[in-house]
Image (tube, helix red, strand yellow):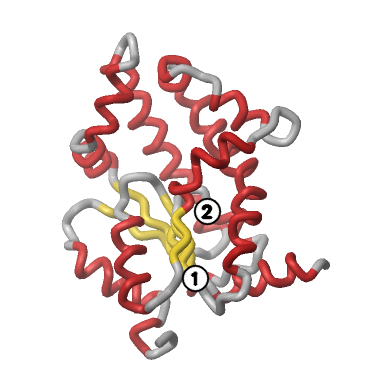
Amino acid sequence: MTASLRSLHRLFSSSFVLGGSPCSGKSTLAERLARDFGLPYYKVDDYQGQHLERADPDNHPTMTAYANMTWDQIWLSPVDRQVEDLFTFYTERFSMIHEDLVAYAGQEAIIMEGAAFLPSLIYAWGVQPRNALFLVPTKQFQLKHYSQRPWVEQILAACQNPQQAFANWMDRDHRFGLEIMQQAQDYVYQTVIVDGKTNIDAQYTRLIDHFQLSEGRWN
């Protein structure tokens, strides 16, 4: 094993991973955690544009295809196919995440946040159950909060059938969340269902308790 791989294994084994479905509050919680505990924060969504630019057909065929598709081609394809492609997309992308994380190799621990941190992928890098948590929204919560995001309207405006595109999008993310829950169970990671009944402060308290940060594990 090379020195860089050893450094990445150490980073994954000591860091905190917040994964799960889109629109579940991951970023809000991760930002607060980073601020309160002085931890570096790697938000995978911030790197999506760079990752798509770096994708090549040989090593990242699904990512390359996605980068060249219209919104209609993405959202009006069969939902089963969309879910399958999303998992493949994240799996192809994980090597790029490794490259990004090399910059954090000297850190004792960081926060890694994003839907791309699939349970199966982080398990292979030695992330322990106490260091990972997956948030999955109910479909009702997801529909409510996606509808409030201006950039969603901009995407749908480019579709010939915005109503069907949105329905497929929500169905895809809901099914993705169900698969994440099953995968998390398979690898003994904990999942939190986000339904809007628990306020953000209570969610945050649960998060730091799960990561054992409230016990002085990190200062």
Vertical placement of 171 versus 16: above or below? above
> Which residue is drawn at the image coordinates 55% and 32% (left, top)?
84
The earlier-in-sequence mark between 1 and 2 is 1
Helix or strand or loop: what does disc 1 sit on?
Answer: loop
Q: Residues within 10 Å of mark 2 (few under 14, many from 20)?
A: many
Circle 2 residue: 117
- The quadrant where residue 217 appears: bottom left
Q: Is residue 190 left or right of residue 97?
A: left
Horizontal and vertical percent position of residue 20: 42, 52
Say which amino acid is labelled 1: Ile
- The quarter of the rendered structure image containing the C terminus is bottom left
Give the label, 1 or 2, closer to the camera.
1
> Which residue is drawn at the image coordinates 40% and 82% (left, top)?
212
Q: How many numbered marks does the figure carry?
A: 2
> Which residue is drawn at the image coordinates 67% and 29% (left, top)?
61
- The quadrant where residue 100 appears: bottom right
Horizontal and vertical percent position of residue 144: 19, 39
Q: Is residue 77 visible?
A: no
Which residue, as the protein is rendered here, is positioned at the far top? 160
Helix or strand or loop: what does disc 2 sit on?
Answer: loop
Q: Is residue 51 visible?
A: yes
Kindly check if marks 1 and 2 are in contact, taking CB atoms under 8 A apart as contact.
no
Horizontal and vertical percent position of residue 201: 20, 69
Vertical placement of 82 versus 115: above or below? above
Q: Residues within 10 Å of mark 1 (few under 14, many from 20)?
A: many
Circle 1 residue: 110
Q: Which residue is nearer to you in this view: 162 or 192?
A: 162
Say which amino acid is labelled 2: Phe
> Which residue is drawn at the image coordinates 37% and 89% (left, top)?
215
Q: CA distance from mark 1 to mark 2?
A: 14 Å
Vertical placement of 63 versus 133: above or below? above
Horizontal and vertical percent position of residue 177: 41, 44
